[in-house]
Image (tube, helix red, strand yellow):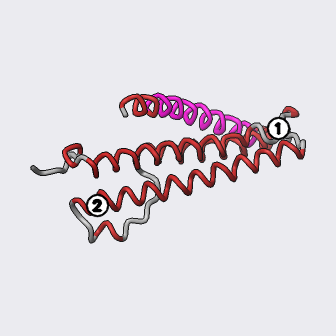
């Protein structure tokens, strides 16, 4: 399991760099648009489209990072009443469901990208529309990977309780 953890850590570093770069670029382009429009009665023709796609990228990469940090939105009503070994089973079910849902969303996003590529539309710099939208299936795939990794770890804890840091002998 260690190799998967290292892969996940490497991907997280890349994601953090991407978020910082994209957020910086988004702020610079948006700020430039404001200055150019208000003081020079002009603007960057491709600026609004770039900012829109940068928001998409920052949001989806941020969601993948939140999944890695275990800070993604969860429904934990039952976890308040379940403790000890029961919480391990509950977490396993939660991670399994999250894996399946993110897997289905990845599949749907791939279909969406195929549809967009068939339409042949373009965006800024005559770039095909589907290209900047590739972030959708990529990040849903990352989230699927991360939830599957957590699910596998929970199954290992179920099989071998000594792997659980909260396990009391």
Distance CA(mark 2)–CA(mark 1): 50 Å
Left or right: where 20 falls relative to 108: left
Quadrant including the N terminus: top left
* Residue position marked by numbered label 2 in the rendering: 87
Left or right: where 85 falls relative to 136: left
Q: Write the start and end of the magenta stretch as one range.
A: 9-35
* Residue position marked by numbered label 1 in the rendering: 46
Image quadrant of residue 125? top right
For residue 4, the mark is: none
Magenta region includes residue 54: no
Q: Position of residue 156 (x, y in %)?
A: 31, 45
- Magenta segment, prevailing SS (helix, strand or loop): helix
Left or right: where 152 falls relative to 82: right
Residue 137, compared with residue 108, is above or below; it is: above
Q: Which residue: 63% across, 53% down? A: 105
Magenta region includes residue 17: yes
């Amino acid at each position: 399991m260690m190799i998967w953890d290292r892969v996940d850590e490497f991907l997280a570093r890349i994601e953090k760099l991407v978020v910082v770069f994209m957020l910086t670029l988004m702020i610079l382009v948006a700020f430039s648009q404001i200055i150019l429009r208000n003081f020079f009665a002009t603007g960057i023709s491709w600026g609004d489209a770039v900012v829109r796609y940068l928001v998409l990228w920052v949001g989806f990469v941020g969601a993948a990072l939140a999944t890695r940090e275990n800070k993604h939105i969860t429904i934990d009503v039952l976890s308040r009443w379940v403790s000890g070994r029961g919480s391990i089973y509950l977490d396993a079910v939660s991670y399994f469901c999250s894996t399946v849902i993110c897997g289905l969303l990845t599949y749907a996003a791939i279909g969406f990208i195929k549809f967009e590529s068939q339409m042949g539309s373009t965006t800024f710099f005559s770039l095909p529309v589907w290209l900047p939208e590739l972030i959708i299936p990529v990040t849903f795939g990352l989230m699927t990977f991360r939830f599957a990794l957590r699910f596998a770890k929970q199954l290992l804890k179920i099989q071998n309780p000594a792997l659980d840091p909260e396990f009391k002998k």
